[in-house]
Amino acid sequence: MPDYQAPLRDLRFVMDEMLDYPAHYARLPGGEEATPDVVAAILEEGARFAREVLLPLNQSGDQEGCLLEGGEVKAPKGFREAYQQFVEGGWPSLAADSAHGGQGLPHSLAMALNEMICSTNLAWGMYPGLSHGAADALRHHGTEEQQATYLTKLVEGVWTGTMCLTEPHCGTDLGLIKTRAVPTADGAYEITGTKIFISAGEHDLAENIVHLVLAKLPDAPEGSKGISLFVVPKFMPDNEGNPGKRNGVSCGSLEHKMGIHGNATCVMNFDTARGFLVGPPNKGLACMFTMMNAARLGVGIQGLGLTEASFQNALAYARDRLQMRALSGPKAPERPADPIIVHPDVRRMLLTQKAFAEGGRMLVLYTAQMLDVVEHGQDAAEREHAETLLSLLTPIVKAFLTEVGFEATNEGVQVFGGHGFIQEWGMEQLVRDARITRLYEGTTGIQALDLLGRKVLMSQGESLKVFTKEIHKFCKAEEGNAELAEFIAPLAKLNAEWGELTMGIGMKAMSDREEVGAASVDYLMYSGYVTLAYLFARAARQSREALSAGSDEAAFYEAKINTARFYFQRLLPRTLAHARMIQAGAEPLMALAAEDFGLGFEI
Amino acid sequence: MPDYQAPLRDLRFVMDEMLDYPAHYARLPGGEEATPDVVAAILEEGARFAREVLLPLNQSGDQEGCLLEGGEVKAPKGFREAYQQFVEGGWPSLAADSAHGGQGLPHSLAMALNEMICSTNLAWGMYPGLSHGAADALRHHGTEEQQATYLTKLVEGVWTGTMCLTEPHCGTDLGLIKTRAVPTADGAYEITGTKIFISAGEHDLAENIVHLVLAKLPDAPEGSKGISLFVVPKFMPDNEGNPGKRNGVSCGSLEHKMGIHGNATCVMNFDTARGFLVGPPNKGLACMFTMMNAARLGVGIQGLGLTEASFQNALAYARDRLQMRALSGPKAPERPADPIIVHPDVRRMLLTQKAFAEGGRMLVLYTAQMLDVVEHGQDAAEREHAETLLSLLTPIVKAFLTEVGFEATNEGVQVFGGHGFIQEWGMEQLVRDARITRLYEGTTGIQALDLLGRKVLMSQGESLKVFTKEIHKFCKAEEGNAELAEFIAPLAKLNAEWGELTMGIGMKAMSDREEVGAASVDYLMYSGYVTLAYLFARAARQSREALSAGSDEAAFYEAKINTARFYFQRLLPRTLAHARMIQAGAEPLMALAAEDFGLGFEI
């Protein structure tokens, strides 16, 4: 069975040393309680919970799956009890406002903990995982009464939440939804329609489920401007706020999926279910984005968590498995063969995993600081700056970390050879679980359009400039630093090229809008690689400083520099290909007529 | 449920038009019977069998899996009957020597048919698939008596074969095997040991199973020089050659795997099983490579088959699914949204699949011609030339086509969005089935070492030169052809760079053998991309000629040129990254000490 140890040392490096979280927290209202000691204690406790409670349920949950019987869904054995422990431990409320029963700690801390949950049991993590988005929507757009009724319960984790968006005929294109909301005499609505792919739509972990549902009012305008958001509880709260009468929403069936078997992915039928409007009528799409952004960051963290889990187990196997001798001569002559970690190509795979895990962690925790500031920052200019960076980085976190997470979990299988394909070792489960992360909450293609179209080009490149300026400043400051030249020189070059590529696309897009879609995914991947290069360069600087200061953890800092060097030399060159493919433009994609794609096989 | 139509038009293009199979067959002894009409009829019949018999069993086989009960393995429902039809149709014996009951048709024809089997039911295809390797080993190394006893039955398909190589503690490193063969008084051997990952090791499709088993003689030298090959039947043939007494070999358990659920992957226990030496004692490894090479080409074809299957179904979905409007304005204004094939990024994914399917098909059929010549060529120099190319291309066929096959099947899932993750659509099964192809019969890493170390560098680059000279000649011949300049110029450049990169690695490897392993996988991928570029350039030339000649299938040839252009502009730039990563060398991989990989999480 796979093992797991939370990367506490690496978290300390990124948070305390590289990104100066102590100072960051000290400046946040409420953040002053998140002292380094408190943070360390919480992370350690979270690590224990992930390893001791969640990890043992991961493989069994995958094999057992969920069961729908008489309209009720049973999660796999142990999931319910683990969730109760989670609630009793106060984990769901960690980063929620104290006004709604939360502990008021920074969001970034919850994100660091979330990585551990994703590393040990992604399917389980999806039960509480969606509550966060639902709570966000109610916090930002709900009435006081809605907040009093639902938000506190969600924050405590006593109830869980869902996001009911997708329908059989539409996922990305929510303007096409057919679910209807008909006003009732008492100011509520009757919701009728079918939603699919509803994660944790029905289950036995919590006493009630709060559905956030997109639907159309009778007089709604066509398309995405006619969507409204509703809160629809599974059980109507009674006068004491406890679950009362069953509402007209039920699980029609469970999807049979490639992975995350332990999570109930439900078809939800709404049959004149009683619901309440959240936010203004026909403004549901904006409210939905509030949920969506939290969820997107969360999915990026899933990619990271799975990468780390796969890396740790592949590393253990590579040290243990004996096979062949090193090409340069035996490294363990006393044994029948060398451990496979001596082979350069095995090292390439392990270092790929390691670099994406450590790089992803830096990206998540860097972005998490922006989220903290957006939510709690005292200074308006600082908030705006953070908002710009956060909205730029969110699609990168989501799509880049899930794309490389899928690659990394596959490298983990590859390190195991044929054994990686066997369920028992648990490595193939990580691949199957990782596969969904490239799809849900907006596919990689959708994230790429969000990044290039909505975030970068719509702001005339201004949002990107906020970030490339920061990188430029960093490069300038280290220009004369010979020890860092191997990182700074290529980073500065890429940073300049990033702007040029963007301008190039912008120019072409003026005469042909399809150029945006044609460049988008390569652009997103390019952006992700440059972003990680920036963060690895900072990590290298931090490590050099620690070594100069005579740290007694020299091996740790040397390893970090080696990982950065691997990243720059063996992963970053992928930008060469992405840049060239961006420049190739739309023509090679658009020339072929749709009816001619199948001429090789269609009769 | 996924659909499938064999790519008969594209096969005709590659075989008849581009690679001039009619002339190739006319020159082969026995090949003269493979007239274009006969070939077309066989391909059509194979297409029907694949679509009508195999395809309907693919999803059900995946869901049902295999059952081990009382030592007997039951394949999924319908598999046995399909196999009987396969045998009755004479398919197994198609390309076998008439001396052993075969029909004596060219191997290349069987390979073209094999693609269809892999597209429609990979798990089923693995039952007859291994027989080929076992038959090859007996044909090349077996005694006349062994051939009379086993080979005819394997050729007819009445019995199936296995390759029993891997043991729990060794896969790649077969020098470590523990299975023992003890001579008996009558010149036979008693084989004792445990073999794992034995595809089709036990099943109910055929009346007998012929195991080809690696084991060590009592006095065998250490390591890979002490391995011998044995034939061990499940049932000892009686005097009439029919299955008689049960031998001491049995299936201990079935593996639970990520994919190919319909195939029985067995732990095989040999308990003083009666076996017979094949080839000379202690020369088993050489005999094994005879099996292995056939199997490796077969696995490459699996990558191709799955790519084509995923492409066809993603294409159908992309034409059908309505979602969003084209960025440049509605393309189907009469419908609620545009079919997603209008979106450039969806086209990018479809074209990636299409290019890898068509490129892979060209590579397989080009290599298949070499195999025909090696097996049946009349001219010694021609045979030697073909042998050099075949051995160079085999690891590329195996590893490159499975790597890009995995990518392509994943693009298929991605085109489906969230629906791709749902089992019902069948797209995720293709990914799970494709995952094994990167692992078995030697992982990608092993193929890469074979290509770079054993094939290219060990011949001082001579084997590569045979191929790059051919490409060079082609480029020279088309130098002045303006219509082809977009293909010829970049191809010529890459072809030259290929040689330079090889020299660079060779030089570095003289002082550090680890440079070979460090460059190997990037080198293999680079080689694959250049090889496909050569073949696409030839396809473009062929298409231009057909257009100039006023073909009435202009759309087909235009589509081919468009696909070649997409390949050159949107896939081939990946060579930029691979070249750079090759040049980065071993240092970034070897610098980190094995014990320092885990410093981020190990306490």
Image: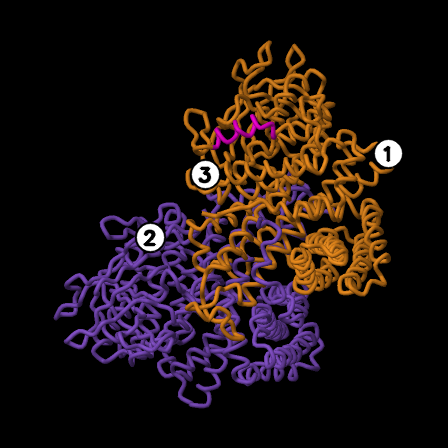
Chain colours: A purple, B orange
Secondary structure that dominates the magenta span: helix
Q: Chain of mark 2?
A: A
Quadrant in which residue A534 is drawn: bottom right
Lateral position of residue B469 relative to residue B342, left or right: right
Q: Residues within 10 Å of mark 3 (few under 14, many from 20)?
A: many
| Residue at 27% from the left image edge and 52% from the top image edge | A73
Q: Residues within 10 Å of mark 1 (few under 14, many from 20)?
A: few
- Secondary structure category for the residue under label 2: strand
Residue type at mark 2 is: Leu
Q: Secondary structure at mark 1?
A: helix
Q: Which residue is mark 2?
A: A254
Disc 2 to disc 3: CB gap under 8 Å:
no
Chain to which the residue tagged by mark 1 belongs: B
Report the chain holding disc 3.
B
The answer to whether residue A328 is seen in the rendering is no
Location of residue B260 in the rendering, given as x and y in whole percent from the top left corner: 51, 41
**Badge 1 is on which residue?**
B380
Label 2 neighbourhood size at 10 Å, few (<14), some (14-19), many (20+)? many
Is residue B48 positioned above or below B592 on the image?
above
Per the image, the residue denoted by label 3 is: B61
**Front residue (pair A433, A304):** A433
Count of marks placed on residues:
3
Amino acid type shown at disc 3 = Gly
Instruction: Let me know if marks 1 and 2 both belong to one chain.
Output: no
The one nearer the camera, B121 or B75, is B121
